[in-house]
Image (cartoon, rainbow, N blue to C red):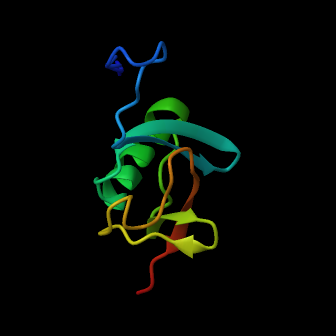
Amino acid sequence: MSELHVEHGHSDAPEKDKNRIELTIRHAGLRVTLEFNLHQKIQKVLDDALRAFADQFNLQPPSNSTAVLRFGDKDLNPDQSIQAAGVPDGAELDLRFNPRSG
C-alpha cells in the first residue's frame, strides 16, 4: 500500500491527510497496523484486520464465533464510523472472538 504525502510549502514535514488514521489491531500476541479513513465503519476495520491476520499469520476465526473489536473496555459497534466510536489515531484495538449462542 503506497502512501501519498501532500506538501503545501508551509513546512518541511509532509502533511498527513487529516482524515487518515493508523490503527494497530492485537490478537494472541500478534499485531497488525492498518490505515483507514476515520469516516469508515468499524466493520471495515474488522474485515481488514481479519484478512490481514489470515494473510500474515494464517489465523482463522474459530468456528461458531463472532469477531469483535475492543477499544479499552468496550466492544465497538461495527455499524459506527471510527470517528463516531471515539477511536483516535494510533489507537490499539483488541480483536476478540465471542462464542455464538444457539
Q: Is residue 101 left or right of residue 6?
A: right
Q: What percent of the width, then of the height, locates residue 97?
A: 53, 65
- Say above or below: 82 vs 32: below
- Say above or below: 61 vs 65: above
Q: What percent of the width, then of the height, locates residue 34?
A: 45, 37
Seen at 41% across and 37% down, the residue is 35
Seen at 46% across and 69% down, the residue is 76
Q: Residue furthest front?
A: 10
Quarter of the figure that contains the C terminus: bottom left
Q: Quadrant of residue 81?
A: bottom left
Q: What percent of the width, then of the height, locates residue 65?
A: 46, 69
Q: Quadrant of residue 5?
A: top left
Q: Quadrant of residue 8?
A: top left
Q: Nearer the viewer, residue 27 or 70?
A: 70
Seen at 50% across and 46% down, the residue is 89
Q: Nearer the viewer, residue 50 or 44?
A: 44
Q: Nearer the viewer, residue 78 or 17?
A: 17
Q: Residue furthest right?
A: 29
Q: What percent of the width, then of the height, locates residue 25?
A: 55, 47
Seen at 50% across and 60% down, the residue is 62
Q: Nearer the viewer, residue 89 or 45?
A: 89
